[in-house]
């Protein structure tokens, strides 16, 4: 491999190894940070934990996006109909 090609390949690998914050990911997806943390908490998005900080690998995020963001969690989420709870209307919710 030519030196210039090797430098480009190393640069691409370094970019893919980059860690993103929840804020970076929220901006990328145009969602709230809370949504990013919820996906991570549900196990749908792998997390790198650095002490109390959570980061997301760019390569994993790109794979998640390529799959349409449809990675399944290990336990499926329950819908309101399955859980037996009714959606709260204006009267039943918090104000």
Image (cartoon, rainbow, N blue to C red):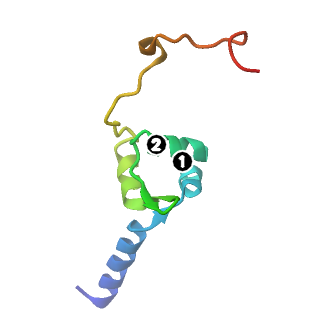
Question: What crowding class fits label 2: few (fewer than 14 Cα within 10 Å), some (14-19), or many (20 or more)?
Answer: few
Q: Is residue 31 visible?
A: no
Q: Is residue 93 visible?
A: yes
Task: Choose top left, top right, bottom left or bottom right for residue 78.
Answer: top left
Residue projecting furthest to the left: 1
Vertical side of 58 occupied by 81: above or below: above
> Which is more foreground, mark 2 or mark 1?
2
Q: Which mark is residue 41?
A: 2
Circle count: 2
59 or 45, which lies in front? 45
> Residue 25's x, y, as percent?
53, 53
Vertical side of 41 occupied by 81: above or below: above
Element marked by disc 1: helix
Q: Which mark is residue 92?
A: none
Element marked by disc 2: helix
Give the mark nearer the N terminus: 2 vs 1: 1
Residue at 49% x, 63% y: name it: 51
Question: What crowding class fits label 1: few (fewer than 14 Cα within 10 Å), some (14-19), or many (20 or more)?
Answer: few
> Residue 2's x, y, as percent?
26, 88
Q: CA distance from mark 2 to mark 1?
A: 17 Å
According to the picture, the residue beneath numbered tag 1 turns out to be: 29
52 or 23, which lies in front? 52
């Amino acid at each position: 491999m030519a030196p210039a090609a090797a430098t480009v390949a190393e640069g691409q690998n370094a970019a893919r190894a980059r860690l993103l914050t929840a804020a970076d990911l929220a901006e990328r997806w145009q969602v709230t940070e809370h949504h990013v943390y919820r996906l991570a908490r549900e196990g749908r998005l792998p997390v790198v934990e650095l002490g109390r900080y959570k980061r997301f690998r760019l390569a994993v995020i790109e794979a998640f996006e390529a799959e349409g963001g449809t990675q399944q969690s290990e336990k499926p989420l329950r819908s309101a109909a399955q859980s037996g709870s009714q959606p709260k209307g204006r009267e039943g919710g918090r104000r």
